[in-house]
Image (cartoon, rainbow, N blue to C red):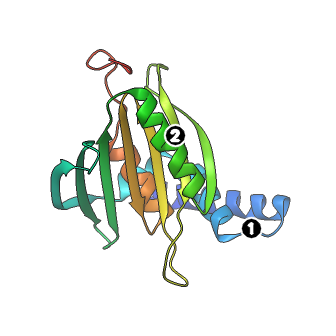
Amino acid sequence: MSGARSLFLSIIVVFVVVVSFACGPLSKDGEEEVTRRSEGKALAEEIRFEWVSMGSGSKKDGTRISFGRLRSDDGVLVERRVESYRSSTYAQKEMQSRLIKAAKVLERGTKYTPDGILVGEKAILLLPTSKPGETRYGAVWTYGEKLFVVECSSLRHLLAFEKQDYPLPDPTLDKPGN
């Protein structure tokens, strides 16, 4: 198995080198983007997460939230929230608010179930921080009246967590807008 892993990692290195020469110098965000796209499924399978804390409550406006913190096997914290709004319109407004407040929108698109059913809008964000030199990423997406928010200091860990712990909802259980 280690031979297959070495071959896989060699292919990734060659891919990154080829892309680097073809595209010119990459920013830190660009490097992580290439890594994310080239590692695919292996990325999510290599990082493990353990729950540190979790809870639920309500915002001042009555929006229900559930929240939790997880730590990866290499010590990186991931925070996640699910905010339940009165309607999908309110969830979409909150999504737009987060896009406006982001330092940068790294990726924006739609989220689908494995069967190709549209779940909602999704974005990967570079979040504003108050500490110089600190980097914070976010993934936000809507699913009916819910807004899912995942935040982390590492884009790699953020994407791995999303892929592992948020396999897309079973559309037969709870369809958007219901």
Residue 17: image location, x then y, percent: 73, 64
Residue 118 at what x, y percent from top left?
A: 49, 22
Number of the label disc, if any, that sits on residue 26: 1
Residue 121 versus residue 78: which sits nearer the camera? 121
Question: Within 10 angstroms of label 1, few (less than 14), some, or many (20 or more) residues?
Answer: some
**Residue at 27% over, 42% down:** 63
Viewed as shown, does residue 42 lie left or right of 49? right
Instruction: Residue under label 2, please give it.
Output: 122
Horizontally, is 42 left or right of 87 in the view? right
Which labelled disc corresponds to residue 111? none
Give the vertical position of 128 relative to 108 (above or below).
below
For the image shown, how many numbered marks are present on the structure? 2
- Amino acid type of disc 2? Lys
Q: Give the CA distance from mark 1 to mark 2.
A: 24 Å
Q: In this rendering, is residue 98 above or below 115?
A: below
Q: Please give the name of the residue rendered at 59% of the width and 59% of the height, measured from the top-left corner.
A: 35
Q: Is residue 28 visible?
A: yes
